[in-house]
Amino acid sequence: MSVKHLMLAALCSATSTTAFAQHSNIMTLQGSADVSPVVNTSSGSNTPQSAKQYTVSGIVTAIQRKALGKDVRPGFFIQDPLGDNNPQTSDGIFVVSASHKVNLGDNVKVTGTVVEAYGWTQIRAAKIDTSGTTEQLKAQMLQSIASDEDFSQTLERHEGMLVTIGAGSKMLVSRTFGYDRQARRNNMAIAHRSINRQANQLFYPNSPQAREQHQSNQARNLTIESSQKAGKGEIPWYPKFAQANHAATAENYIRIGDRVNQLTGVLGYSHGQYRLYVTQEVTSDSFTHLNPRTNKPQLKQGDVTVATFNVLNYFNSPFGGDSNPSNKSRGAASKKEFEMQGNKIVKAIIALDADIIGLMEIENNGYGKKSALVDLLSRINKQLPTNEQYQFAQAKDSALIGTAAITNQVIYRPSSVSVAKVQIISMPQQHAPQVGKESGNNFMRDALTPTFIINKSGERLTISINHFKSKGSTCWEDVALQGNKDIDRQGSCENFRVSGAYYLGSQLAKIDGHKLIIGDLNSYALEDPISVLTHRDSLPTDYKITAARDTYIGGDQHTGTLLHGAKGAIIEKSFGYINTVQAKHPQAFGYSFSNVVGTLDYILASPSLSQHIVDAIEWNINSPESTLFEYPRKYTGKMNKYGDPYRSSDHDPVLISLKF
């Protein structure tokens, strides 16, 4: 066939594709349900489509010049300028088209197939006609109506439209600008009416209320995007982000809990989430800080203050410090980063103004002049008068605590307390049979447990500093019993953390006097390990808390002492400690992950302290802040960094004040 005949055949094919397209409008194609009424959903495809082509008209409201990840293809959004006066049907739709050039405000006629691209109604354009330019459409205010069953239905009614989120939309920042693991790019998230609480923070695991909380979090969520991938350390729609009028701290920032006053963009859907692609730049006035920054903790004062602080892998070994057992650094990648990390942590610790501070995630390289502990202590004391300076407490004959790269430490003010005794509680190890890639060998950091005497009152106070097994790794039960499915959302290794909680409580019961369990317990407030240490008041009578199998103290099956054997154990005992922050401030949070907040760090008080607790708080300097403010430069480019306490760690410090 000649080239001419090939061209004619192609033209005839294109003509036949569009000549019999059915004329319609955007509202009809969108319909009033989650899926377009013209799409055949019985095909079983992830992208079901209509049997015929449709022609609709609209005004171009936003343009997607290049693909954004794998979920947003090049194209543009169009919207019917008049609509159909039916709030149940959206007036806008996304047009997939890589070859047609359009401008904002163009009045276009689009012919193509309607598809549901993993839940997002789109038109895959075969033909586009531009018939002149009009004034750009004004954004419609995003608001719920009485018939909306939940907020996701509110968003569905506006899918594809140009909308504005104002103060009346009742939207709060639920995740600050940072990495989205699903979409694999930086973005932000907001939620309707309230921030998202981790399901096990207020309700026991896998309870009907916890499942409802999780579903509510999903339904109320809206991810905030830009049409292009964000550069390192940049929010494309907030050009002044991280800038300041002076060098001390940023004045343009966003925090979890901020109320949205002004965000304008077009609504899409991908990775199981509705997404707003912002089309207008914002300023600091676009948000109201309902949970504002404070330069020191707002703690009611007593006789003595105790704090716990995760220092986010404070490692000095790469910069002239002593080595650790693993000979690996988990901290700063350069001397400049290390100095920034040090400045931020020192600012935070000085502002804590606590008499005793437990430290987690500090390098386990001993107590010498070149240790991370002494390095940090020296930096702190240089900025304090003599009577407010700190010392460290060390267990007798212990050069290191455990064999991990990080450990727990404690510093205290001799002007306020003195050390009576320091012991180390060896926490459980798991040595179970290998199953798949899970070796069955799991470890937990040992608990540094000093006893102090309060100088003014002579009271003895034992403080156990802990860092329980992470939720992110796997243990035997996760693979062998749960099939790597986290049904109750306790994360991995909850049974092993139960073993740790049970053993810690049993050992502390042998120590007389007042006691505090402090540190990162890697458990939300009503998860099993916390229920073991506190109480079972929130649990049904038939609720079972199970400890891990094959756990030992001080070694493996050959060198250690058996804690629980091959059947594990059902733990029925709780030790009665008071969750002090929850008792004083039930809605407090200190950690943010994957668009939910909760508490992982605790100060748990023995019942003997119930009449001596003045106050207990989470100081929100880290969890509400963007991860971009942390010390590493790897993902933030030339963004401004500040030696302030904000995002000095990923965990918030916790404080308690006691009065005797």
Image (cartoon, helix red, strand yellow):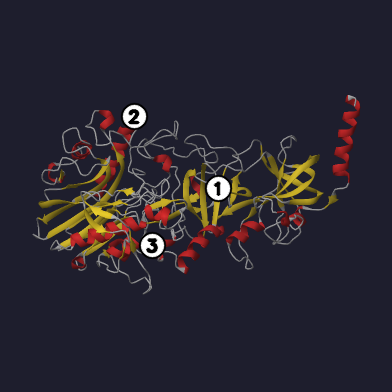
The mark lying in front, picked from 2 and 3, is 2
| Amino acid of disc 3 | Gln
Counting from the top left corner in percent of width and height, residue 238 is at 52, 41
Q: In the drawing, does residue 591 fall left or right of residue 220?
A: left
Q: How would you rate the neighbour count of disc 2 (Cα within 10 Å): few for under 14, some for 14-19, many for 20 or more?
A: few
User: In this orientation, which residue lies closer to the viewer: 303 or 417?
Assistant: 417
The mark that comes first in sequence, 1 or 3, is 1
Look at mark 2 in the image and give the residue it sits on: 334
User: In this orientation, which residue lies closer to the viewer: 572 or 353?
Assistant: 572
The mark that comes first in sequence, 2 or 3, is 2
Q: In what quadrant of the picture does the C terminus appear? A: bottom left
User: In this orientation, which residue lies closer to the viewer: 347 or 494?
Assistant: 494
Q: How would you rate the neighbour count of disc 3 (Cα within 10 Å): few for under 14, some for 14-19, many for 20 or more?
A: few
Looking at the image, which residue is at 46% across and 60% down? 487
**Disc 3 secondary structure class:** loop
Q: Which mark is residue 224?
A: 1
The mark that comes first in sequence, 2 or 1, is 1
Q: In the drawing, does residue 398 fall left or right of residue 140?
A: left
Look at mark 3 in the image and give the residue it sits on: 587
| Amino acid of disc 2 | Ser
Looking at the image, which residue is at 24% across and 35% down? 324
The mark lying in front, picked from 2 and 1, is 2
